[in-house]
Image (tube, helix red, strand yellow):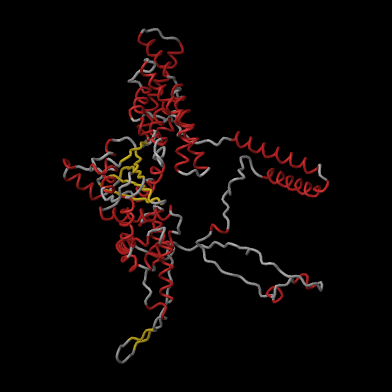
């Protein structure tokens, strides 16, 4: 019996050839004129092919793993350390000049010494920091004001001298000095509990030995009308499941392990009841507002609903795919996030939303260039529709060529990169939409118009083959040029659809963790919960407090849901509390 030793295949070397080198190698192969270097390349390609086949056969390969095998890396934004260095050196020179001016004046000598001591202290502190330390960041530290969700307790002095407004230290030296009120000094203590905790009340019980009647100690008044599941516990489940992506079954396992069991079916029943009574009325208002937004962005990804998967198996001819759509609408200074998981593409979801529009103002849309993103609308809506396309999608085509060493693609990336720098300047300086448009017209428009002329010349003078990768990338950009460059024509037009692609990650996270929805009803409940929570989060309100308020004032939410949108609920609650107090 022969034995074979399993030898681990060694990773093959990556072979990098530019487009020009690739074409030259092909021509030499066809003409049977190979050099020794050519033979080495061909042998390496054979080894690479064998290694790749063996690796794919022995491992479950994903796209990300396959990219790593070939050494491909995603583009990342790098910090310009040189600019930071220059800024730092500039500030040091200014400080030194200030010190020189101060030293020339004898009346300010003390101030100069203090400055030197301060600068020396800063230098000593900077030496303690590790390499790459950024003074502009907190490095994981938060201020007291960031903890706005914690309980606050006031601690007062019990010293009668301090209460009277005098200094106790000076009093010991027979001196009377008044105290001046300063800002309170706060200390934060963080505690931990299971996600859902509980209180157990053991009620004393007696039974009559003659009539068998039971006597149970009554509950305190504060507990008589208290529900088993408090609004806070329901909110906690909603946030961790729909916002954090924690599956119901995993939460059930965690709760059981911590001695507070909570069945996954019970969790869904609580979510369904909360959705029907507290969430759905407000989400319906948000959908109405979203239809009247000034700008709407949308994108979709794949979704999974077991109900539809079963239908597809039973009726292959009527097979439909499931799409998970994210739609962002800019409405009166607020951003509304709407999610939808069903058989509609992003374009159909947008159509269902915009058909409820009842204002006359035109609207912008931002999406990629897929034909399904442009549904047939009524003429009254088409004349108001300003289409913007994602410039980032076009840029990616050139970046793929840039990785292969294409210099023309590098030039295109450089021009588009400058446009993004201009847009970053507008954001950093908080320019108004009108000022942003003027800035892009002054700085970005000349660059883009020159790029348009140059790209046309590449095709016109046959410098680029139209059917090559570079040619297809150029035609993709030129064909949709007006929609890609709306940012220097229309007030409020953005460059790309990246914010919406970031928003859709919550759907991807949920799909990754929970895998699927069982029914379309469950998907609708989940989409509405996500829509409300994410909109509240980006409205910078406390989502825990907000969802609790919707449950505590459930009856008013059903009567007047428009008053309970995230940016209005605090005013509404305060008004109701004043009325109740009166």
Observer-nearest residue: 413 or 33?
413
- What residue is shown at x 43% (from left), y 72% (from top)? 578
- What residue is shown at x 57% (from left), y 35% (from top)? 80
Relative to 579, residue 21 above or below: above
Q: Position of residue 168 (x, y in %)?
A: 75, 72
Residue 322 lies in quadrant: top left
Q: Position of residue 9 (x, y in %)?
A: 43, 28
Residue 59 lies in quadrant: top left
Residue 403 seen in the figure: no
Tell me if 144 is positioned left or right of 294 in this view: right
Quarter of the picture holding the C terminus: bottom left
Residue 40 lies in quadrant: top left
Q: Position of residue 319 (x, y in %)?
A: 20, 42
Q: Position of residue 182 (x, y in %)?
A: 66, 64
- What residue is shown at x 76% (from left), y 42% (from top)? 99
Residue 353 seen in the figure: yes
Quarter of the picture holding the N terminus: top left
Observer-nearest residue: 55 or 513?
513
- What residue is shown at x 32% (from left), y 35% (from top)? 369
Q: Residue extending furthest bottom?
A: 210
């Amino acid at each position: 019996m022969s034995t074979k030793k399993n030898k681990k295949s060694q990773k093959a070397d990556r072979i990098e050839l530019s487009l020009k080198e690739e074409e030259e190698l092909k021509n030499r192969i066809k003409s049977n004129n190979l050099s020794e270097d050519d033979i080495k390349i061909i042998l390496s390609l054979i080894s690479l092919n064998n290694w790749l086949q063996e690796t794919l056969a022995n491992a479950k390969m994903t796209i990300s793993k396959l990219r790593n095998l070939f050494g491909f890396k995603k583009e990342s934004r790098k910090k310009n350390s040189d600019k930071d260095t220059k800024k730092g050196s500039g500030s040091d020179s200014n400080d030194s000049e200030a010190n020189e001016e101060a030293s020339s004046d004898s009346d300010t000598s003390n101030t100069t010494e203090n400055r030197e001591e301060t600068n020396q202290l800063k230098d000593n502190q900077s030496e303690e920091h590790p390499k790459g330390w950024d003074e502009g960041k907190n490095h994981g530290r938060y201020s007291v004001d960031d903890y706005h969700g914690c309980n606050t307790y006031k601690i007062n002095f019990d010293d009668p001298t301090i209460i009277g407004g005098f200094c106790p230290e000076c009093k010991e030296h027979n001196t009377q000095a008044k105290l001046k009120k300063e800002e309170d000094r706060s200390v934060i203590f963080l505690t931990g509990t299971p996600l859902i905790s509980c209180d157990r009340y053991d009620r004393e019980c007696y039974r009559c030995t003659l009539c068998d009647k039971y006597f149970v100690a009554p509950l305190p008044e504060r507990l008589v009308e208290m529900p088993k599941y408090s609004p806070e516990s329901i909110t906690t489940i909603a946030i961790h499941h729909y916002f954090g992506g924690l599956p119901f079954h995993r939460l059930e396992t965690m709760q059981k392990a911590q001695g507070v069991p909570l069945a996954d079916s019970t969790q869904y029943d609580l979510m369904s009841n909360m959705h029907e009574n507290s969430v759905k009325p407000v989400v319906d208002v948000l959908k109405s507002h979203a239809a009247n937004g000034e700008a709407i962005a949308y994108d979709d990804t794949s979704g999974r609903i077991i109900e539809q998967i079963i239908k597809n198996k039973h009726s292959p001819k009527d097979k439909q795919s499931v799409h998970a759509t994210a739609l962002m609408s800019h409405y009166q200074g607020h951003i509304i996030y709407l999610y939808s998981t069903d058989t509609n593409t992003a374009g159909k979801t947008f159509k269902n939303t915009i058909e409820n529009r009842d204002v006359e103002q035109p609207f912008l849309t931002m999406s990629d260039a897929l034909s399904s993103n442009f549904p047939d609308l009524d003429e009254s809506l088409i004349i108001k529709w300003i289409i913007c396309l994602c410039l980032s999608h076009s840029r990616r085509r050139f970046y793929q060529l840039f990785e292969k060493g294409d210099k023309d693609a590098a030039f295109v990336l450089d021009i588009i990169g400058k446009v993004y720098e201009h847009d970053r300047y507008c954001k950093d300086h908080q320019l108004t939409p009108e000022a942003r448009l003027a800035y892009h017209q002054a700085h970005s428009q000349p660059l883009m118009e020159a790029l348009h002329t140059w790209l046309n010349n590449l095709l016109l003078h046959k410098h680029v083959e139209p059917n090559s990768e570079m040619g297809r990338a150029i035609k993709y950009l030129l064909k949709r040029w007006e929609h890609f460059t709306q940012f220097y024509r229309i007030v409020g037009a953005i460059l790309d659809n990246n914010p919406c692609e970031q928003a859709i990650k919550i759907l991807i996270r949920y799909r990754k963790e929970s895998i699927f929805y069982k029914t379309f009803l469950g998907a609708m409940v989940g989409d509405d919960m996500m829509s409300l929570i994410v909109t509240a989060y980006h409205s910078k309100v406390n989502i825990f407090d907000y969802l609790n308020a919707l449950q505590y004032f459930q009856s008013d939410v059903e009567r007047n849901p428009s008053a309970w949108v995230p940016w209005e609920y605090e005013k509404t609650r305060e008004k109701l509390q004043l009325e109740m107090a009166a």
